[in-house]
Image (spheres, coloured by chain):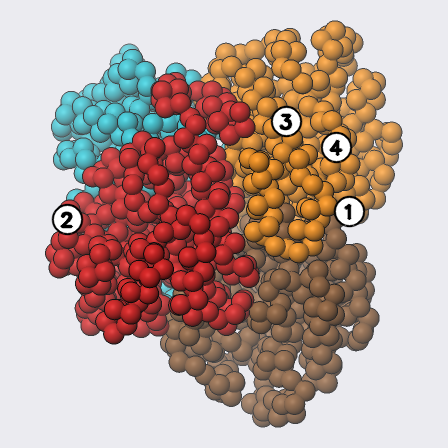
Chain colours: A red, B brown, C orange, D cyan
Amino acid sequence: MVKRKYAAVAVIFGNTADRYVIQGYTEPRSFDQMLDDATKVKGLTGIELVGGWHVNDENQDRVVKLIQSKKLKIAMLIPEIWASPKWGWGTLTSSDKGIRRDAIERIKVAMDLARQTGCNQVSPWFGHDGWDYVFQADYARVWDYLIEGVAECADYLPEVRIALEYKMKEPRTHAFMSDLGKMLLLVQAVDRPNVGINLDVGHALLGYESMAECVALLDRFGHKLYHLHMNDNYRLWDDDMIPGSVHTLEFIEFFYWLDRIGYDGWLSLDVFAYRERDKIAVARESIAWLETLSAVAGRLDRKKVEAVLKSGDAMKAQRLVREAMFG
Amino acid sequence: MVKRKYAAVAVIFGNTADRYVIQGYTEPRSFDQMLDDATKVKGLTGIELVGGWHVNDENQDRVVKLIQSKKLKIAMLIPEIWASPKWGWGTLTSSDKGIRRDAIERIKVAMDLARQTGCNQVSPWFGHDGWDYVFQADYARVWDYLIEGVAECADYLPEVRIALEYKMKEPRTHAFMSDLGKMLLLVQAVDRPNVGINLDVGHALLGYESMAECVALLDRFGHKLYHLHMNDNYRLWDDDMIPGSVHTLEFIEFFYWLDRIGYDGWLSLDVFAYRERDKIAVARESIAWLETLSAVAGRLDRKKVEAVLKSGDAMKAQRLVREAMFG
Amino acid sequence: MVKRKYAAVAVIFGNTADRYVIQGYTEPRSFDQMLDDATKVKGLTGIELVGGWHVNDENQDRVVKLIQSKKLKIAMLIPEIWASPKWGWGTLTSSDKGIRRDAIERIKVAMDLARQTGCNQVSPWFGHDGWDYVFQADYARVWDYLIEGVAECADYLPEVRIALEYKMKEPRTHAFMSDLGKMLLLVQAVDRPNVGINLDVGHALLGYESMAECVALLDRFGHKLYHLHMNDNYRLWDDDMIPGSVHTLEFIEFFYWLDRIGYDGWLSLDVFAYRERDKIAVARESIAWLETLSAVAGRLDRKKVEAVLKSGDAMKAQRLVREAMFG
Amino acid sequence: MVKRKYAAVAVIFGNTADRYVIQGYTEPRSFDQMLDDATKVKGLTGIELVGGWHVNDENQDRVVKLIQSKKLKIAMLIPEIWASPKWGWGTLTSSDKGIRRDAIERIKVAMDLARQTGCNQVSPWFGHDGWDYVFQADYARVWDYLIEGVAECADYLPEVRIALEYKMKEPRTHAFMSDLGKMLLLVQAVDRPNVGINLDVGHALLGYESMAECVALLDRFGHKLYHLHMNDNYRLWDDDMIPGSVHTLEFIEFFYWLDRIGYDGWLSLDVFAYRERDKIAVARESIAWLETLSAVAGRLDRKKVEAVLKSGDAMKAQRLVREAMFG
């Protein structure tokens, strides 16, 4: 079993808003404060930054030094192509050539930063690329844009990995890059060695996907599991709760598959702690759950599991998990 | 058939944000601009105001005169108990007595305004009263608070109607006041003649409720349909799209039941037009759909419908609707 | 903490079919075989029978003796008002007076049997009372039938409890008796001391209800939790899987509330073990999960829980549960 | 606009069961009776048969002549790999080599029949290939079986098309072949010119997919839309209601895309008319809806639609559809 590497998106330590409470539920917090908090979470060794937001050409040196001084690593650079109204009608799939161009530029800028900071990976998310109403999108045309856009980025810096993130919906009612199957299709169409997937496990749950199956298929179709966003939800919406707070057995199965494919990347906390005032507790409790459920997976006898998988006997499977959990 | 009376929440003409694009997708707009827009929508005769926000003790005279000068009516006053972080952990059901008291005061202030402006009804929505995680709420205790709180408000000004609004979730992952059944239970427990329901039809759809059934039951259990919020969605989230843009037949059935119970209140557009730049078009298109589908319902032969309802014959029912739609 | 009493619906030990494999997935099994299996499940002391199916006027003496000889108790009698095409268009809410009358008779027959066998409770489920298509039901009228029908049954034998079961859908796409709120409304409208609820926890999950909240509200509104059907699912359908196989933390919270209200009734396994050949393992594994999760709930410090509930602090709540689970 | 060709699965005219009413809701009906019914539905020119069930080596000549005598065409042959308990633990993905072999044989037999009858296409559905519980399936291994199995069938008779059907769940709680993305991935992995997709539009709706987007993507990725199964549902379950009875605008958009890609295959009614006694009315009403909504799509000005798609203006889109519907 590989030792888990935990990171967090910086915003887990920030003040989060929703459409009703636009100013956010807790006090505003600076990036420096968020980093300070991060250092107080045992086991947390990486941080994700939004490029062009937390880090940009101008503050880059300062930010990198600051992060190093805290003994944190930059786990991921996220291109900012979703937080400004400019992107509201799409990025790579916009009908507006200028917007498509700008989105590609933003990804490339993040890639530059990723290379310079040694993080070497970026994770674009295309939350505005989709539609809300019928007859609002040319479903076929957009895939040309998608494939071309991702390919252009991939070719720009082949040594930087592009970990695409998908989600079925929100903020659009429907996203083009909605599920694992479509993402693997896209990855194959783009056909570049540095293009893979950032699996947000909550997005998998939201789409009635199995987190474990996603891991297995990402590995089977080209070793394309590049990164993990960790959170939890009640399956019907991207609630972004702490991982382990809703699903228990499914996380254990997920860890079993992570070990089976030998995943050694980050498990990065992507939690929206709207109402939690103690943000450090949020990260700590997240890691506590992950460590606990990962340890349960580690107690499973691999051979017994494989025999059970082969048998397809659900009651034997249940017993195995239950005993690994509670002895 | 009663002539429909259309209103709109003021924010349909405003700039709307979500958790990703906090500044909103379009340009900021003043209340006066929103009112101006409202006057440009044919058939729109009422406007809903958020008390303490659009209208308060200080600006009240000005606002009322302004609205009158535009020949609009105040359709509803909404107490502001959901847009500030203060309410984030609950209002009437907060563990904090001070917060509960403040929430009651805010409702009473809205009731005062409702009386003074002649609108005579308020619609509190308790979006923060609920929970996100297990073991976060005392599910039994909160109902004491709820019943006491609503009763106190009802007694404060018996001539002002309180139209309670429910929704299954959001912003909390779970709300106490989640569905029609619980609301009727609450209404009966409160047992005041001026307490009823503001049915947001999108919230009904989100909860796998039938809009038509909600109308029928609200009428059957004490004539408690006080007000209507109109919008549409894909059933799994409160997408707040324009009414009629997803569901067609169900809106026709809904209008049939409105007529059957003789509803003569407002149909108020509660739409979040995130990405629609032309807000006037949003309201116009909403009313166009509602008028169209209402007209279809009006073409149904009441006796034939009742015969079909009695027969339970779905194919006859389909034919009836189809022919009313397309001749 | 009250010691848990486990029962099972007899069919858990039977051969179960679905709409594709109508003959069922495993071998046909006689009622005697099912009973034999039941005796092999440690901790299982009760069995639920379908009146008019497993037990009727003619075989009653034999069946009761057989069950007694196995040292099992009859936990519940279920009136057969859902397994024959006769009921397909509704029972208590049928437009056909004869069908309504027959359904009431079937419930009364089950009540007679319940009294004679000492079980003293029946649990009618109204799966066919609902609708599939728009304009197929008179949503208001059916509530008169419902209230009258249940009241007539309640008055027939006041010493026998009627534990009504609800479910949002299936086999109809929509049921009249769909959720907890509507059931409490019905219970209050019927207003008889022997009418309460059989809470199928899977039906609660399917309806995005909280199992714990259901327990709390059933107790708060008249101590109406009469019986429990135990199973699990992925929230979107009544999958009837073994309890504990999907939801873990929510079952712990559920047990906490059972203890808090002092529930001392049955926990009855209502599982459809379609593909599980070893039916005894299904019941054993179900009870193993329930005992395990119940024990975790028992390890929670009641005072600490109440402090956490009052605080609404989700992270403290998570820690409490996690430590009760894993130390 | 291509003239629509309507077919139906034979069972639409039959007696349908579910897990509660195993004998079915209406009278048993012979295959001959079903065919007779089919001839009474104006516009219905094709029929789908289950190979090994409606038609087999022995009755083949009689059945084909019977169908021809009724002036019906065989629209599709469905291999029977889902109606017997034998398949309950999987077909092509079974751990049991013998079962895998038998499933392949059954598909080949159907292919032979398809060639001999001139239908020239088969549509296997893998409803039992999936899992119910965690740790019940080796998610990676099964894809080897799937790809090998489908490829072997494809090579057996390259002149017969294999139209694979997917569905997210049921009868398993999770299917391997669950959504459009995974199917296109499979089609590409199999890489045979005679392997494509039978799109069941209800399955798309169930999986929060857009029917129109499915059509567009199936065309874009290799012209792989081979066949259509038509029905409708409330998005959360495969209710198998008549097409058009729930979704209206989405069907219009779907027809627009069918025309745009030039689809000239069958639209085959796959409806489970559980409670509808008049099966002919079910098929008639289905076709009436499809013709109506198809005609609306036909009234859309193609250039205007394309301009709207490009603009992404949802209100313009709504107006376009509304006016095409109601003038």
Question: Looking at this view, is B270 or A50 the one in front?
Answer: A50
Distance of mark 3 from mark 4, alpha carbons?
A: 12 Å
Residue under mark 4: which chain is it in? C
The reply to whether discs 3 and 4 touch (Cβ–Cβ < 8 Å) is: no
Q: Which circle, 2 or 3, is nearer the viewer?
A: 3
Residue type, mark 3 in image: Glu
Tell whether C110 sits left or right of D36: right
Q: Which residue is mark 3?
A: C291
Residue under mark 1: which chain is it in? C
How far from the left and from the top, in percent, is residue D282? 46, 39
Question: In this view of the protein, can residue B4 be seen by the observer?
Answer: no
On whether disc 1 and disc 2 are found on a single subunit, the reply is no
Q: Residue at x 51, y 14 (%)?
A: C278
Distance of mark 2 from mark 3, alpha carbons?
A: 52 Å
Distance of mark 3 from mark 1, alpha carbons?
A: 26 Å
Ranked by sequence position, the earlier of labels 3 and 1 is 1
How far from the left and from the top, in percent, is residue A285? 51, 48
Quadrant hosting residue B124 = bottom right
Q: Which residue is mark 4?
A: C1
Residue under mark 3: which chain is it in? C
Q: Check disc 2 and report its element: helix, strand or loop.
A: loop
Question: Looking at this view, is D73 or D57 the one in front?
Answer: D57
Q: Which residue is mark 2?
A: A192
Ranked by sequence position, the earlier of labels 3 and 4 is 4
Tell whether D307 sits left or right of B259: left
Could you say which disc has been placed on residue C220 in the image? 1
Question: In this view of the protein, can residue C60 be seen by the observer?
Answer: yes
Q: Which circle, 2 or 4, is nearer the viewer?
A: 4
Q: Residue at x 87, y 29 (%)?
A: C159
Quadrant hosting residue C327 = top right
User: What crowding class fits label 2: few (fewer than 14 Cα within 10 Å), some (14-19), or many (20 or more)?
Assistant: some
